[in-house]
Image (cartoon, grey):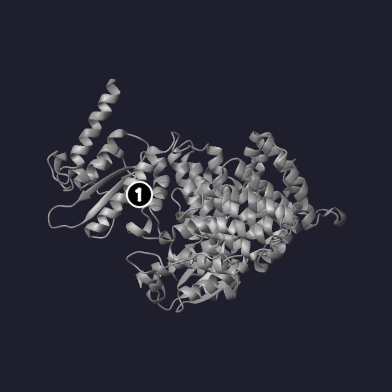
Amino acid sequence: MNQLQQRTREQSEHFLQTFFGTGNGVWPDLDPDYRHGHRTLPFVQAFRRGDDAPIVLPRTYPSGDRRFVMYVIARDTVDAAKTAELIRAFAGPTYIAYNPLWGLRPAELDPEDPIEKAILDHFGSGVTFRLTTGKTPQHRTNLAEALQLMQRTVANRPPRLWRLAKPMGRLLAEFDASLSAGGESASLDVLEQLAATGGITATNLANLHIKRLDRLGRSADVLAFPGLLDIVRQNPPAPVREAILNAIYSVALEKPLTENDLDAAKSSLIEAGRVIPDLLPGGFSSFGPQAMTVLLFAARVREDMAVLQRLVAAIQHSGHDSEIPSSVWQHVVELEQEKTTEASADLLPEQQPTLVESTVALALEPHVPVESWGDLLKAIAEGGPEGQAVLEDRRWVDWPSPATEDAALAEFLDGLQDHEADRVWGSVGAFIDAIGYEAPAGHTAHAFIRNALTFDRFGPGDLVVLQALMEIALRAAPTEAEYKDLLEEIGSERSRWVAAERAAIALDFVDRLFLAACPSEDARSNLAYALLEPLWLHQQRLDAADLAFAKRLSQELGIEFAWEAPAGDEADDELATAIPPLTLLLYSLDESVLARCQEEVKQLAPAVKVVTAADHVGSPQLRQKARSADVIVLATRCAKHAATGFIDQNAETEHIGYANGSGSASLLRAAVDALRAAAAAS
């Protein structure tokens, strides 16, 4: 044994002596003659072996305190998310108590507690889960046995890496794609992986956080983001600049401009817009009407004619002029006319430029050689900087839909070499955003699905993307042969990701099968059965919302599983009585999903009044719905800040939840969790 191994072993033994010392009565001082030591010995032996299974160590508190705790410790911070999945898989809600709203997350250990201080000193923070269970001996035995099984299963499997570190580029692509697909918690998981992995600067990580907050419509959080002024001064990418401008619009300008009060809008902008001067330079042709309105109004207040002319021309060129508030547009045109008249007073009439002539020449940005989706995919596949620049600046927003090039794009994707296909996956988020819920590009979506399966893309963000791609492919009315191929391909790798802890995403897939046209009943039944069977086998671990929706889908698709009430201390059939009369607002751009979720919430919680919204922009009706709701839950796939930010600003409740996906099951899961939280707080 070399010196390093000897020192590591000594440190481990010192930790064990401290952990089982004062403050822990489960095996005092590891005394070999202690009569109950055999119960804890398997966990100590697993720790000493040093395999890659999570560490599990029990604790009882001093005499008179009946608390019992199991600490589950990940071997590394980047293993924390995987460790949470293992805990849910082996112990789940059956044997442990945790808040389903927040899920399983590492505990904040108490440095004043001698046992938890020993853990902090030896393993650091962010890797330890503190699990509690019922107070009876049987509860403790059940939990201990479940966690022993978890350790044995991980330790005895064929030798391979338990955790595979993903390259930075792949994580960034997964983040962007999960945002586009509406994966709220999935995008957060990827952000945490990026932070833990390192290799990304603090500024770039902050940029990603701001993009995510913008997608969720959390305008106040964007403007309160730590070090925002420093971030802006470092010339962030166009989507980050647009996110900040969107937030300023929602917080400072939306209300006074709706009331046509330009003086109040000016005062509010001056107060909230300290970062605007640093956002005025640079390109903005890809910005939406809210961000353009902020820049336009700010340039008008500053009487910055150079920026104002560029903005006017860019807005007219993009066709957003009809979406700019009329009071702001008129205000700008009046100043333009005044300044143009002054500047050209000495010119002959035929020499005087018109507003559009004078501004278009100044405003149009340099020619971009990548001008179509075909060009973009080719540039990304080749690995050059231009394709990535187009993605980062979202220059594709004004292009025709990818649906116009569907067959050619799919053929190109299917003909790529592996390294090229891996690069092109970075564009899948932009593709989903560009398609929206309008004309689908089914062949391209199917090609991206083949890409995902080829490269084993089954991470938390990848799965919500895969579901969104399947929705696009099915909405394109595939032929029977195409339909069968698509469903067989998705079902071929189901064992890699379908499990009780991922029930909502599996149910989203099945729900989309029911909602879409069906050219082959057999293919649909086969995939639905394959996705529902693992949930049926482990139904005691399902959340009430997932279980209820699984039952409904089984009935609708004619799949006869014997679903039973879940086990546990809290009977889920009490959900109806546990949630008092509340008003719930559900928001999604997929109205079929809204309708199904609304029906299911009424079944689970009859006292709840459910209203829905699918607005693309703010409106008086949406304002009233947001203000009157006790609970708000949003599905953010393809949603625009104009709607989500509007809801956030007008909501009078703190109970706002987000679906982790775009399907009925993920929206239902988020709704039930948010209702439970509101009921507990009332």
Local packing at callout 1 (Cα closer than 10 Å; few below 14, some 14-19, many 20+) is some
Image location of residue 140, percent across then percent down:
25, 55
Is residue 49 shown left or right of residue 27?
Answer: right
Considering the image in quadrants, where does the N terminus appear?
top left
Q: Residue furthest right?
A: 350
Secondary structure of the residue carrying tag 1 is: loop
Considering the image in quadrants, where does the C terminus appear?
bottom left
Image location of residue 329, percent across then percent down:
68, 64
Q: Closest to the observer: 654 or 145?
A: 145
Can see residue 662? no
Is residue 588 shown left or right of residue 285?
Answer: left
Is residue 507 shown left or right of residue 31?
Answer: right
Q: Is residue 327 above or below residue 454?
A: below
Q: Closest to the observer: 492 or 242?
A: 492
Q: Closest to the observer: 541 or 508?
A: 541
Q: Is residue 258 above or below residue 43?
A: below
The image quarter containing residue 421 is: top right
Image location of residue 277, percent across then percent down:
56, 50
How many discs mark residues in the rendered view? Answer: 1
Q: Residue at x 59, y 55 (%)?
A: 467
Which residue position holds label 1? Answer: 106
Can see residue 138? yes
At label 1, the amino acid type is Pro
Q: Residue at x 45, y 67 (%)?
A: 672
Image location of residue 170, percent across then percent down:
56, 40
Q: Is residue 36 above or below residue 584?
A: above
Q: Residue furthest top?
A: 2
Is residue 241 shown left or right of residue 200?
Answer: right
